[in-house]
Image (spheres, helix red, strand yellow):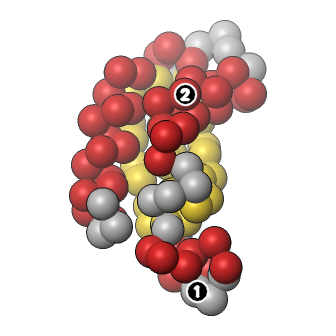
Amino acid sequence: MADFETLQAVLTERLQELHPSSLVILDESHLHAGHAGAQGGAKHLRVKIAAAGFTGLSHVARHRLVYDRLRDLIPHPIHALALETQAS
């Protein structure tokens, strides 16, 4: 699952459980070229997600909901995950 398109599809499928009104997944691996964590093809990703289910939740609680669905993908094939979450 090293290529971005495959990984993007997996994340999109898993995050559908949160019923996002918007979801953008960006590969920022090129910004971390040469970083030890990127060895072996591990990706640096940014996920921007808005969901009604985030309403009333703290920043940390929203992040936990996302991480709970992706935890088994860290540290490989995802080395780093930057999250931008908001209620919609």
The residue tagged 1 is: 33
The residue tagged 2 is: 68
Vertical placement of 35 versus 21: above or below? Answer: below
Q: Position of residue 68 (x, y in %)?
A: 55, 28
The answer to which quarter of the image holds residue 33 is: bottom right
Q: Which residue is at 30% across, 45% downward?
A: 10
Q: Position of residue 40 (x, y in %)?
A: 48, 76
Query: In the image as oriented, which residue stretches furthest toward the bottom?
Result: 34
Q: Which residue is at 49% across, 40% downward?
A: 72
Instruction: Determine if residue 18 is in view.
Output: yes
User: Which kind of residue does numbered mark 1 sit on?
Assistant: Ala
Q: CA distance from mark 2 to mark 1?
A: 27 Å
Identify which residue, 63 or 51, lies in the foreground: 63
Disc 1 residue crowd, few under 14, some 14–19, many 20+, Cα 10 Å: few
Vertical placement of 24 versus 20: above or below? Answer: below
Locate the N terminus by quadrant: bottom left
Q: Secondary structure at mark 1?
A: loop
Q: Which residue is at 64% across, 27% downward?
A: 64
Quick check: 9 left or right of 75?
left
Quick check: 22 left or right of 86?
left
The answer to which quarter of the image holds residue 13 is: top left
Vertical placement of 33 versus 23: above or below? Answer: below
